[in-house]
Image (cartoon, rainbow, N blue to C red):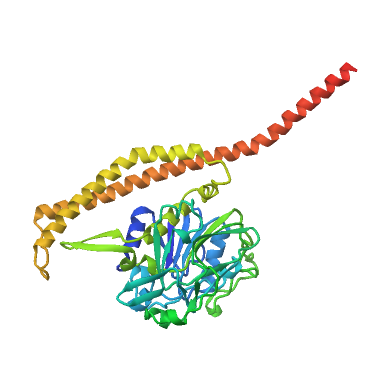
Amino acid sequence: SPAMMQGQRPTPPWVIYQQIKQSFDVVDISMEAPTIDPKIVKVLLVFHPAGITPEAEFSIDQYLLNGGTVVACLDAYSAVAKMMGPGNPMMGQPETPTTSTLPTLLPAWGVSFESAKVLGDSSLATKLGGDRLGLAVLTVNKKSMPQKDNVITKDLESVTMFLPGAFSVTGGAGVTANSLLKSSTNSAFVDVLKASQFDPSLMNTFRPGGKAYDLVTHLSGTFKTAFPDGKPKPKDAAATPKETKDEPAKTYLKESTTPSNVFLVADIDAFYDRFAYNIQNFGGTQMASPSNGNASLLFNIMDQAVGSKHLIGSRSRSAIRRPFTVVQQMEADFNQTIGTKIEEFQQKQKIAQQKLSDLQAQKSRGNELKLSPEQEAEISKLRKEQVEYSKLIREQEKDLRRQKDKLAGNITLLNVAAMPSLVIIIGLLLFIQRRRATRAR
C-alpha cells in the first residue's frame, strides 16, 4: 500500500493521482508524521516536498532504514506549481514553491541534485510549435534508457520532462545505483527564466558540458542514516515537552535492517494532466488517455516498488544470469487469462468513444453536446466497466506477485539449505573413501 507525503487533502487531484488511488490503497501522510511504519506503508511516494523540514526527512530516513521503499519526485522548477500559484500541486493546492529537494537525505545517499537551474539538452530538445524550442523540455527516447531490459522502462517509447532538474549519483557503501532515464552528453544546466521562455536563440549560447545526468534513478542496498546524531530538534523546542530523567532515551536506526529501495525522479510536471494525458469531455464526463510514457513510468515504478523486493530489477540482470523461466511462465499464463478481457474492454471503449466523437462532430462549434439518457447510460456503464476491469487486473497482478514471492522464498530456502547439504555429502564421501583405503592396507 503506497502512501503520499503531502500537506492538505486533494481538491481537485490530478488525473494520475485519481488513477493511483484506483489502483492502490492510498493513505495521505502529513509532513508532521513522527513515524511511518513500513509494515503498513509499503511504499512512500514523496511528491514535490517543497520546504520539507529536517523532522520530516528524519521520518523518511527511519522508514527507509526499517525496510521501506521511497519514491521521491523532486523538481528544480515546477511550472505547474508556479501556475497554480500553499499545498501540494498534485492535489491542486495553490501557492507552492517551485523547487523541491531532500537536502539532508540526498547527500547521505550519494546523490546531488541541481535545484537552482534546469537541465538543457540539445539532443533531446523538443520542438513546441512555430519557432519555439524547448531546450529544457526533454523528449527522452529509448537511447536514453540505459536499462534496456528493466521492467520499468523496457516497454516505454518516450518520456517527456518539462524543465527538469538532474541527479549526479555516486552512491555509497552498500548502495547500488541504476540509472533508468538519462540525458545525453550534449547537456548542461541553464537559467530557469531563459529556458521557460522557449526562445530558440538560447541554443546559440548553449554550451554542452559533455556529461550525462540521471533524470530517473534507482538506489538499492543497505543505507546508512542521514542523521548520525539522532532525531533533529524542532525549531520551536520550547513547544516540545522535555524528556524526564525517568523516561528512557529513544533509540533510532543507524543503518538498514534489511535491503531497501529508493526511486528518484527529477521532474513533477511530467505527470500533470496537460503534459501526460489527452483529456476529452463528453457531455460533462471526462475521459483521459496517455499522451506519452510519463504516466506509465510512474505506474511502473509504483508496481515494482509495491511488488517483491527479491525480484526488483531481476529482468535487468537476465543478460548475465539464467532467466526465471518459472516466473516467465507465470506471467505468460497471466497474460493469457486476462489479456482477452483487456482487449474486449479496450475495443468496447474505442467503439463508445468513436460514437461520442461522431455525435460531437455533428454539433456546431461552441454549443455544448447534450446527450440522451441512453447515451449517458452508455458512458456510465463504460466507466463502471473500466473500474471493474481495473480491479480485476490488479487482483490478478497481486496474485502473480504473491506467487513470485512464494517462489523467491523457496529459491532462497533451497540456496540456504543446498550448500550445507552439499558440504555434508562431500564430507561423507571423503570419509567413506578414506575408510576403504585404510581397510585395503
> Residue at (59%, 54%) from the top-left corner?
259
Count up the numbered dots: 0
> Residue at (30%, 40%) from the top-left corner?
340
**Residue ranking furthest to the right:** 441
**Residue ranking furthest to the front:** 204
Position of residue 128 relative to residue 224, above or below, is below
Query: Who is closer to the viewer here, 112 or 196?
Result: 196
Based on the displayed image, in which of its 4 quarters is residue 129 positioned? bottom left
Query: Who is closer to the viewer here, 329 or 88?
Result: 329
> Residue at (54%, 57%) from the top-left corner?
261
Position of residue 188 relative to residue 355, above or below, is below
Query: Who is closer to the viewer here, 376 or 440?
Result: 440
> Which percent across, then down, holds residue 372?
8, 56
> Which percent across, then down, holds residue 374?
10, 52
Q: From this viewpoint, is residue 1 visible? A: no
Based on the displayed image, in which of its 4 quarters is residue 255 positioned? bottom right
- Where is the C terminus found, in terms of image quarters? top right
> Which percent across, then down, holds residue 300?
42, 54
Position of residue 63 relative to residue 76, above or below, is above
**Residue ranking furthest to the top:** 440
Q: From this viewpoint, is residue 438 visible? A: yes
Q: Is residue 160 left or right of residue 351?
A: right
Q: Is residue 393 left or right of residue 66?
A: left
- Where is the N terminus found, in terms of image quarters? bottom left
> Which percent across, then down, holds residue 176?
59, 58
